[in-house]
Amino acid sequence: MAGEWIPYDVCLPQKPEVLDLVDRTGLTTDQVVGRLVMLWGWASLNSSDGTARISIRLLSRICGGDESFWQAVQDVGWLVIDAENGTIGIPGWDSRFSKAAKSRALATVRHQADKLGGATRPQQGRAAPPRGARRARDRGDRISSSSPQEAAQPEPDTGTPGWPTLREAWAAGTGRPWKLPDPPDRVADRLAEPGWFAKALAAIEALPRCRYFSDPVTLPQLVAEGFVDKVLGGQFENPRRAAAGPGRPDDRPPAQGWSGDDAARFAATKAALAAKIRQEGAA
């Protein structure tokens, strides 16, 4: 039955980080690996960029372990705990667990199946890709077995500003701090857009004027499609309108008295009603 999945490295139990966690916590390898897989699986269902708003107490309830265990996971570099903001982050998310990483994993499986099937010639009607492009594609299909720390940035010889430059500009701005070593999803797509990087720098400088947001803008918001253009277009400079609520008793207008003919008819009605009550009482 199809369902949500994450890539799993068969060498995970032998990784230095896992062995270090076993020594630090006194747990078995099975317990450590099980809790890590629980963490990654939960994050895959509840996060798009490897960050999530969750307390360590709740994380322990979901994935097992206690605060000292997850602190040890942070110490080996596989978790970032932001106690001040009540969030966690998973380093290397984009290169291992994001949708793009899953696509690369599936492409690798297909590529290996083609090789095992003996497909030595291109299919009829399809041109074979250039050798250099095929090598580049194969490099992109591989998933490193170690904890990934590669940033999603263009090749150095393209001249396109990359993730490190963007991160420095973001850190100098007023947006919510980005504490993970890897960039959020869609950074590579935005950097590939002509002119986007220059507009992004201008948008970062313009964020203090964006009174529409009650909380600091996040980096995933910045790299969302079209967000930079909206910032530069001034669409977020006006404060957000308060949502209309049911209202309180004090919000009602004061009562107004009767006047003119309405007041005379109201007085006549009251007098007739009082007379009727007196008659019924006498009977």
Image (cartoon, rainbow, N blue to C red):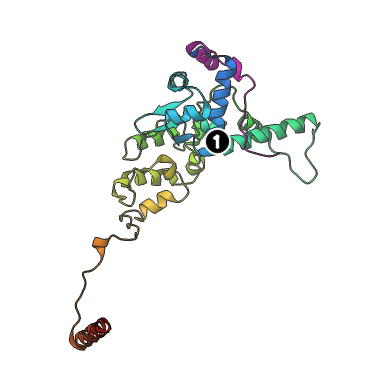
Residue placed most toward the observer, 182 or 233: 182
Residue 179 falls within the magenta-colored stretch: no
Q: Is residue 138 visible?
A: yes
What residue is shown at x 48% (from left), y 43% (from top)? 190
Q: Quadrant of the N terminus?
A: top right
Question: Judging from the image, what secondary structure is the residue with disc 1 in?
Answer: helix
Q: Amino acid at mark 1?
A: Ser
What residue is shown at x 44% (from left), y 31% (from top)? 88
Q: Quadrant of the C terminus?
A: bottom left
Residue 5 falls within the magenta-colored stretch: yes
Residue 29 spot, x, y in % from top left:
58, 15
Say how many tags the image has.
1
What residue is shown at x 43% (from left), y 28% (from top)? 57
Displayed quadrant of residue 245: bottom left
Crowding at mark 1 (Cα within 10 Å: few <14, some 14-19, many 20+):
some
Q: Is residue 90 visible?
A: no
Q: Is residue 272 above or below residue 161?
A: below
Q: Is residue 265 left or right of residue 51?
A: left
Q: Is residue 195 above or below residue 120?
A: below
**Residue underneath mark 1:** 44
Q: Is residue 263 left or right of residue 84?
A: left
Q: Is residue 269 left or right of residue 35?
A: left
Residue 20 spot, x, y in % from top left:
51, 13
Residue placed most toward the observer, 32 or 238: 32
Residue 10 spot, x, y in % from top left:
65, 21
Q: Is residue 73 above or below residue 276?
A: above
Residue placed most toward the observer, 199 or 219: 219
What residue is shown at x 32% (from left), y 44% (from top)? 205
Tell which residue pokes out farthest to the front in this image.
283
The magenta stretch spans which residues?
1-24
